[in-house]
């Protein structure tokens, strides 16, 4: 077995396979000095390391090539494996093949982590009643392959799945949700057609016994209903059409319609997450948990008190009448648009990072009504500033080189009553390892003001 990428997914997969007697080679393009911690973590396992590149010799005698999420299809080693007809897989595929229990899978352009955490909380409230134990993980940070040996048929698992993982998968979860479809990761997938094709694989390998949950209000997502092999549920901010099963908003509450009829699940006032996009996440979570057998009480217990995951509209502090929010997860302009809609107060918006080849003009149009000042930083700073100059020439815009300078500029321009919002619209890779590191550094910088 050859594993490419010594990140969380690769390390978990190497540990699992090696512990079960497989002959494992783990390859990473980084040099040995950058992987000392990873090598120490796997020091108890017999495996071969290949560092500083991915030589073609790794494929000699290989039965399977296992890719971490960040490994592109264009990597020469991957192309060679496909040419040699060596099967390509990943940790999520292996988990679905091995899991003894029912699995809920969640994907979408935005909201995956929040929805996965919510469903996990709702399933947790079922423990000792409808199920033995609930498990949550996947792209959320905890590869569930690490836990599969501890699972039983009486459990339930919920897994977050990215397009990077789905593009290789030929297995599907028993309950699958697509939250939304919007342009994203075009730097990886090249076209929207490729991106959507990756997402829809979560449906393409389901069976007639499975269930899919789709966003009824998002035309791009609902158009995928033709791919559903089993039962189809929906979620919507409006009452669903007669006969359509799923979760929806009626009056001041979320309701569920299933084969047993209609019942109220959750008061909207119980939702503590900011923004309309998060209400959609709650709707999807309610539908998935209910489809998995959760009671109304379990759904309410899971939803109440949940204020979101780190780096997702996360309140950092209030300083001199200004509230600072960390939305580092917003690595696409449309994610930043959703963040803007969550606030009614004037916003000082921090935009930038590394561009993903996505348009910024719609964000600039929305900002005209909600943003008082834009601070552009990082590699994409000039591109963002140019888009605002074209679309919103009256907008106050400051260009700075990096995130640290952006925080200082925002602090200098923010006024009492403002929101300072880091919702970059670009990836973190020009300056940080990932969006989480960027968010942590932002919190630290803000707390040091």
Image (cartoon, rainbow, N blue to C red):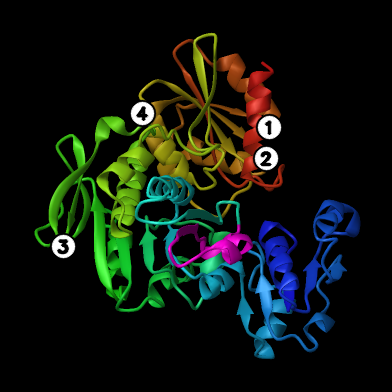
Tell me the mark number nearer the camera, choosing from 3 and 1: 3
Left or right of 386 in this view: 418: left
Answer with mark 2 or mark 3, whichever residue precedes in sequence: 3
The CA span between labels 3 and 1 is 48 Å
Residue under the image location 73 percent in, 68 percent down:
14
Mark closest to the chain's N terminus, 4 or 1 = 4
Q: Mark 3 vs mark 4: which is more N-terminal?
A: 3
Local crowd size for mark 4, using a 10 Å CA cut-off: few (<14), some (14–19), many (≥20): few
Q: Nearer the viewer, residue 200 or 119?
A: 119
Label 1 sits on residue: 441
Which image quadrant for residue 42? bottom right
The residue furthest front is: 128
How far apart marks 3 and 4 lie (CA) works out to 44 Å
Location of mark 2 (residue): 437
Determine contact: label 3, label 4, CB under 8 Å.
no
Q: Nearer the viewer, mark 3 or mark 4?
A: 3
**Secondary structure beneath disc 4?**
helix
Check disc 4 and report the residue beneath it.
369
Specify start and end residues of the magenta stretch as a single range: 143-164
Q: Badge 3 is on which residue?
A: 259
């Amino acid at each position: 077995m050859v594993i490419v990428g010594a990140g969380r997914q690769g390390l978990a997969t190497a540990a699992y396979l090696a512990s079960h007697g497989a002959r494992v080679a783990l390859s990473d393009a980084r040099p040995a000095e950058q992987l000392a911690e990873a090598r120490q973590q796997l020091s108890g396992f017999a495996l071969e390391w290949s560092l500083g590149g991915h030589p073609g010799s790794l494929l000699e005698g290989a039965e399977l090539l296992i890719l971490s999420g960040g490994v592109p299809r264009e990597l020469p080693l991957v192309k060679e494996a496909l040419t040699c007809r060596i099967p390509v897989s990943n940790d999520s595929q292996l988990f679905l093949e091995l899991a003894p229990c029912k699995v809920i899978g969640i994907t979408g352009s935005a909201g995956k982590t929040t929805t996965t955490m919510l469903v996990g909380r709702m399933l947790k409230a079922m423990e000792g009643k409808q199920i033995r134990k609930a498990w949550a993980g996947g792209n959320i940070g905890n590869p569930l392959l690490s836990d599969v040996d501890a699972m039983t048929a009486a459990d339930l698992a919920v897994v977050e799945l990215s397009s990077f993982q789905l593009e290789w998968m030929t297995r599907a979860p028993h309950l699958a949700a697509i939250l939304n479809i919007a342009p994203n990761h075009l730097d990886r997938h090249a076209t929207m057609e490729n991106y959507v094709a990756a997402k829809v694989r979560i449906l393409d390998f389901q069976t007639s016994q499975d269930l899919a949950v789709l966003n009824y209000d998002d035309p791009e997502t609902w158009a995928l209903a033709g791919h559903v092999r089993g039962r189809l549920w929906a979620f919507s901010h409006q009452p669903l059409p007669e006969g359509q099963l799923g979760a929806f908003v009626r009056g001041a509450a979320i309701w569920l319609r299933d084969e047993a009829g209609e019942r109220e699940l959750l008061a909207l006032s119980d939702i503590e997450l900011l923004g309309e996009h998060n209400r959609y996440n709650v709707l999807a979570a309610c539908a998935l948990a209910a489809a998995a057998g959760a009671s109304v009480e379990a759904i309410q217990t899971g939803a109440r008190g949940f204020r979101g995951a780190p780096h997702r509209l996360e309140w950092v502090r209030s300083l001199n009448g200004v509230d600072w929010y960390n939305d580092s997860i917003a690595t696409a302009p449309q994610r930043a648009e959703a963040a803007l809609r969550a606030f009614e107060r004037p916003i000082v918006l921090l935009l930038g990072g590394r561009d993903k080849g996505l348009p910024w003009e719609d964000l600039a149009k929305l900002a005209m009504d909600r943003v008082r000042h834009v601070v552009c930083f990082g590699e994409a700073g000039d591109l963002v500033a140019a888009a605002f100059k074209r679309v919103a020439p009256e907008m106050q815009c400051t260009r700075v080189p990096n995130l640290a300078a952006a925080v200082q500029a925002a602090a200098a321009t923010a006024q009492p009553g403002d929101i300072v919002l880091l919702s970059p619209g670009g990836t973190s890779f020009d300056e940080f390892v990932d969006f989480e590191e960027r968010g942590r550094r932002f919190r630290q910088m803000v707390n040091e003001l």
